[in-house]
């Protein structure tokens, strides 16, 4: 909400940037960013529209900042699992369990905001498009590096080109996120991921 400064009359209110951003992030994640307007964010946060525009510049600026906030809380921890130097099977299982976390317990929406925004990229302005592209590049390169390392340890199929395997893992992640958004069961999402990762990598211990 906007907080009034202990000021003399006529001084403008100070916008609580973090609160407005948290409201935007939750609403975009829950309903989809193309279904939520600046007016919606203002009504829910108690912020004024001029104040939001002063702080974020535009609707494009707010959406891009929401995506970067999402990256910090959801994408970075997920990709961090790839850097633990565990076996391919152990890391794969950790990735699956991360995706299958109890959303109700964590009080977060189903699905993945990054996946939603990537699928709707054409709907956004240049700032948000650039953020989507940066997040996607980080996501893809992280899996490329993980696959290369797994191949060097003899844990990943050598007959599948590394970039092709990374693209397939991206597709699995997107599929799982879309299934969750449609309220598919955890068992169905788990099966998609473990059978898919096993087939791509050649590591059948993922299934055990």
Image (tube, rainbow, N blue to C red):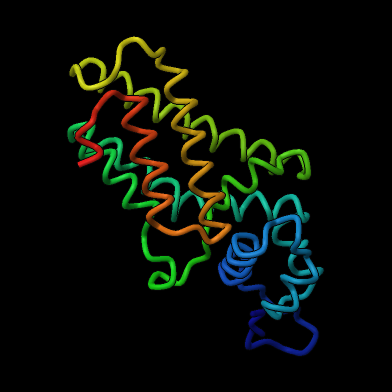
Q: Say which quadrant the C terminus sits in.
A: top left
- Residue 118 pos. (x, y %): 63, 41
- Residue at far top of view: 159
- Residue 145 pos. (x, y %): 35, 23
Relative placement, left or right, of 118 versus 173 is right
- Residue 58 pos. (x, y %): 78, 54
Relative placement, left or right, of 77 versus 204 is right
Q: Is residue 165 above or below residue 48?
A: above
Place residue 20 in its image quadrant. Answer: bottom right
Relative placement, left or right, of 27 versus 72 is right
Q: Is residue 117 above or below residue 130?
A: below
Relative placement, left or right, of 78 versus 20 is left
- Residue 162 pos. (x, y %): 40, 16
Place residue 50 in its image quadrant. Answer: bottom right
Q: Say which quadrant the N terminus sits in.
A: bottom right
The front one of 8 and 76 is 76
Q: Is residue 4 above or below residue 140?
A: below
The front one of 17 and 194 is 194
Q: Residue at x 61, y 64 (%)?
A: 30
Q: Residue at x 47, y 27 (%)?
A: 168
The front one of 57 and 177 is 177
Q: Residue at x 75, y 78 (%)?
A: 43
């Amino acid at each position: 909400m906007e907080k009034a400064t202990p000021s003399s009359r006529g001084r403008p209110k100070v916008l609580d940037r973090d609160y407005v951003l948290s409201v935007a992030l939750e609403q975009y994640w829950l309903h989809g960013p193309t279904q939520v307007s600046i007016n919606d964010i203002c009504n829910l946060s108690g912020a004024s529209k001029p104040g939001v525009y002063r702080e974020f510049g535009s609707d494009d600026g707010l959406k891009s900042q929401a995506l970067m906030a999402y990256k910090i809380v959801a994408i970075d921890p997920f990709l961090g699992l790839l850097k633990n130097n565990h076996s391919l099977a152990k890391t794969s299982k950790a990735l699956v369990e991360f995706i299958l976390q109890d959303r109700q317990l964590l009080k977060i929406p189903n699905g993945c905001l990054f996946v939603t925004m990537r699928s709707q990229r054409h709907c956004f302005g240049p700032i948000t498009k650039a953020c989507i592209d940066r997040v996607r590049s980080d996501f893809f390169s992280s899996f490329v590096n993980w696959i290369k390392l797994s191949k060097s340890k003899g844990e990943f199929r050598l007959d599948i080109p590394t970039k092709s395997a990374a693209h397939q893992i991206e597709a699995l992640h997107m599929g799982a996120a879309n299934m969750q958004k449609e309220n598919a069961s955890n068992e169905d999402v788990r099966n998609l991921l473990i059978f898919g990762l096993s087939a791509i990598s050649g590591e059948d211990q993922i299934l055990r």
